[in-house]
Image: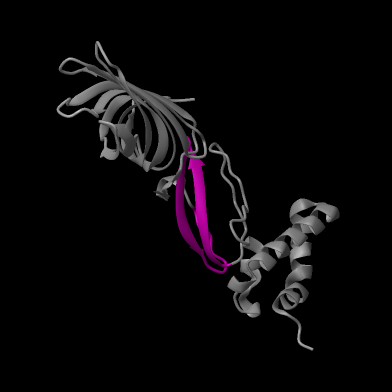
Amino acid sequence: MADDPLTTLLRRYGPYIYARCVRLLGDRSAAEDATQEAFMRVHRHLQKAPDPNQALAWIELGRDQVIAEVTADTHARIAVQPGRYAIRASRDGRLFAGQVEVAIGGVRSVSSDALAPTLVASTTRKGGLAAGGGAGIADDLGVVPGARIELVTGRGLSFALDAGSRAGSGFRETSLRGAIGYRLGLTRGAWSAWAGLEAGGGAVIQSRQHPTAYSGVLSAGGLAGIALEATRRIAIAAAATLPVEWLKRDGKATLILVPAGWLGVAVRL
């Protein structure tokens, strides 16, 4: 009876992978674990396996497998099988990516400067403080000035709180909103840009001598921004948010588009 594809690959390349792991790790027990992990990856992605006769490099790399970690102040020589390899490098909280083709007997030198910035979730924690304004809920109120505080985690999650207030004709409108979001960013030199989505809620208060009107708010929408580094830790940032908000106005539930713009500073934490 013919072997299944995984057994065929294991019989053909298992001893070689194990011997290679022993040379790299210097420990037979660790080499057994590494070999098992390599073929577990093969099993999870078996439908993507090439022909068994050309599968060696595919098995060694697996899917998103790290074959080397190099610090910013070192140079390394890494021996690999001939083929095409994806390269990712992290520097100063930014991610760069590219591909390199390695021929038999060839030597390729790769610098992170030759790699292109890639769109990723932020790998650096940042805090921000901005001033700006957005559209008011009341008709003909105009732009409501306000302030925004936000925190961005190292995994692209963001938490924001903004507040604004402006006097209208015989009343004052005050708003307070909080939101949780997710963003992807791209960095080139001192410039960076990002875009994402956020959702949250809050309250709007329209105060008069009598009565005072309150409304809860639910919101969801997009955000985008750019930043320019002033120092290694501080950047000048400009951003825009475009949420659609659900609230009660004049006693009726309604949806309102409430664009806002912000200018401030972002600090790497």
The stretch in magenta equals 82-109
Residue 8 placement (x, y as % from top left): 73, 78
Q: Left or right: 88 with respect to 25?
A: left
Residue at position x 62%, y 52% in the image? 66
Residue at 73%, 80% (x, y): give it: 4
Q: How many marks?
A: 0
> Residue 195: where, in percent of width, then height?
36, 42
Q: Is residue 238 left or right of residue 140?
A: right
Relative to 253, residue 51 above or below: below
The reply to whether the magenta stretch includes residue 86 is yes
Q: Residue furthest right?
A: 29
Residue extending furthest top? Answer: 209
145 part of magenta stretch: no
Is most of the magenta stretch helix, strand or loop?
Answer: strand
Nearer the observer, 203 or 226: 203
Observer able to see residue 175: yes
Q: Pick whichever, 99 or 263, lies toward us.
A: 263
Q: Position of residue 49 (x, y in %)?
A: 61, 73
Q: Residue at x 51, y 50 (%)?
A: 88
